Image (cartoon, rainbow, N blue to C red):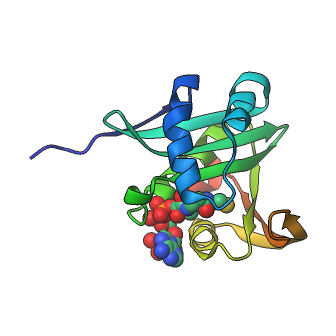
Amino acid sequence: MKRLVFKYREMIMSDIKAIMDIETDVYPTPWTRMSFINELRHNKYASYFVMLYDDEIIAYGGIWNIVDEAHITNIAVKKSWQGKGFGSKMLSFLEDQAEIKGAKAITLEVRESNVTAKNLYENNGYDSWGVRPKYYTDNNEDAVVMWKILDKESKLDE
Ligand SMILES: CC(C)(COP(=O)(O)OP(=O)(O)OC[C@H]1O[C@@H](n2cnc3c(N)ncnc32)[C@H](O)[C@@H]1OP(=O)(O)O)[C@@H](O)C(=O)NCCC(=O)NCCS
């Protein structure tokens, strides 16, 4: 029986076509191709990664690292691969990358109505710290702001 082999690597320009197929499929208001290009080319604080099964991109995500804090800008799993634990794996990988770059805490915004994503974050140790009212301009939806303290030392003690 063939063993499933998954790996991570940094996102590159030639990934953007496959990323856009996923992005437009999973988000009501997807990022544009130009947003990804700008992030990869011009944002020195940004790091983007993909998770591959063989050569297929099945998940991706990005972070901004600013001093000792990281901000998750995007995380998504291809629809046919959702609900199988890959969102949690991608999230954990992003946290590890954030820590490698010096982050001691990580934050994100999530739509109030995005129950799946809120469950993903809550089950992985994120706490709600407040709400940014009408953060999403497409439908004036509130964003829930979530934070997690990243602490390698305490993880080693577990
Ligand atoms: C959010 C997303 C990344 C989760 O990825 P996933 O691979 O489906 O998630 P996982 O299988 O790792 O599940 C993680 C947790 O999410 C929750 N979850 C998963 N599918 C769910 C569903 N259909 N309904 C409710 N909660 C769900 C569960 O709590 C699960 O934890 P558990 O297995 O310990 O119960 C994925 O659904 C996605 O790409 N959504 C569209 C993009 C998006 O909204 N990104 C987040 C922006 S803030």
| Vertical placement of residue 145 versus 152, above or below | below
| x and y, in percent, of residue 101 in the image | 70, 33
Left or right for 123, reference 89: right
Task: Out of 156 and 25, give the one closest to the viewer.
Answer: 25
The quarter of the picture where residue 93 lies is: top right
Q: Residue furthest left?
A: 1
| x and y, in percent, of residue 72 in the image | 71, 50
The answer to whether one can see residue 127 in this image is yes
The residue lying at 56 percent from left, 25 percent from top is 12
The residue lying at 63 percent from left, 56 percent from top is 154
The residue lying at 65 percent from left, 62 percent from top is 28
The residue lying at 82 percent from left, 42 percent from top is 68
| Vertical placement of residue 140 versus 109, above or below | below
The answer to whether one can see residue 92 in this image is no
Q: Residue furthest right?
A: 133
Left or right for 64, reference 54: right
The quarter of the picture where residue 124 lies is: bottom right
Total marks placed = 0
| x and y, in percent, of residue 102 in the image | 74, 37
The quarter of the picture where residue 5 lies is: top left
Task: Out of 152 and 49, give the one closest to the viewer.
Answer: 49
Left or right for 69, reference 133: left
| x and y, in percent, of residue 95 in the image | 62, 48
